[in-house]
Amino acid sequence: MSRATHRPTAPHRGALSNPDGRFEPVRHEIEDDGWGTLAPRADDGDDPEGWGPLPAPETRVAVDTSRSIMTRNCSPDVPFDRSINLYRGCEHGCVYCYARPTHAYLGLSPGLDFETRLFMKPDAAALLDAELRKSGYRPAPIAIGTNTDPYQSVERRLGLMRQVLDVLSAFNHPVTITTKSAMVERDADLLADMAARNLAAVALSVTTLDRDLARRLEPRASPPAARLRAVRTLADAGVPVAVMVAPIIPGLTDHEMERILEAAAEAGAAQADYIVVRLPLEVEGLFQEWLETHVPDRARRVLSRIGAMRDGAASSSRFHERMKGTGPDAALLSRRFAVATRRLGLTRRGYDLDCTRFAPPPRAGDQLRLL
């Protein structure tokens, strides 16, 4: 059976199809293989396009053999210049995820492949140790979770994030973490120890408080209530924790901004921020397909309002505009956020983590330093 495109698929996945990546030389269309694998739905009559649900896609994990672990950037609108991504692809399946198009570089689809064909970096901790020991290395906070989630489902059995945190803690190296998963609670002990040395801060992303909507938008991420529980757990452990109202989807979730911020403050968050949804490359088609399937009555309005914040487009890559959008709707959203965060005491911006403690720990066999 050829790669399925633009057809209903199994539950608990975000994308509804598996379109070919933009670099592929051919395009695939769905076709039955002669064994009745894709039987027409009974209510579709003679419609040849009325195929039933596709087989449930299973998650497969392969090894990423990258020889480096740290990615550098010089973007003027992000508060870090280096990041780590332990996985390629993300099983959370957030249909709006701006990282989806990266799977096209692997010859895979930004659709279902992105959330089912994963790549792990088993040598991440060792690669990081080697990177931090280089003679010319200068410390600055490392951001983890900026592309794919370090606490996605497979992390539960692989434990790569815990290994990386152990390395960072041993080096006294600062780290910031962004996640949609309550699994971060697993590492609360280590994060609390690092936070006591001013080396760690965590941000939980909350898109909506509506459990049903969250299940459809981001099907394998933790439910909203579990994320807020993780905020409380970390805050109680002394870890600086923020809530990201992200992404805000105009016409779908933007009305929840104030309620999310109130819930964040109640859970113990010390600060907050927000990002407006952007739909680069293949994500635009995947999200439009999701809208037409799950909220058909609002699909056109949502896309229109996104365009109103993106100069008529679905996405923008311009620095200082891509995160918040432009135009009257974006300005109103910014004012609402400012009023709410001021009222709730969530006005702090950023954490000044300590880079002065950084020191590579001695390895077995290293010559002792002269006193």
Image: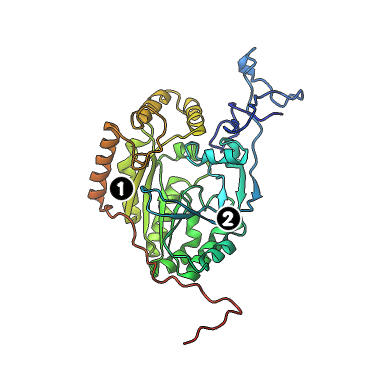
Is residue 139 or residue 100 the one in the foreground? Answer: 139
Percent position of residue 309, x then y: 34, 32
Q: Quadrant of residue 252?
A: top left
Picture quarter with the N terminus:
top right
At a point 63% along the width and 51% down the height, the residue shown is 64
Residue wearing tag 1: 262
Percent position of residue 41, x then y: 64, 20
- Residue 59 relative to residue 320: left or right: right
Amino acid on which the number 1 mark rests in the picture: Glu
- Residue 97 relative to residue 59: left or right: left
Label 1: state its secondary structure. helix
Percent position of residue 277, x then y: 40, 37
Q: Quadrant of residue 52?
A: top right
Q: Which mark is drawn over residue 156?
A: 2
- Which of the two discs, 1 and 2, labels the residue nearer the N terminus? 2
Q: Which residue, as the protein is rendered here, is positioned at the far front?
A: 136
Label 2: state its secondary structure. helix
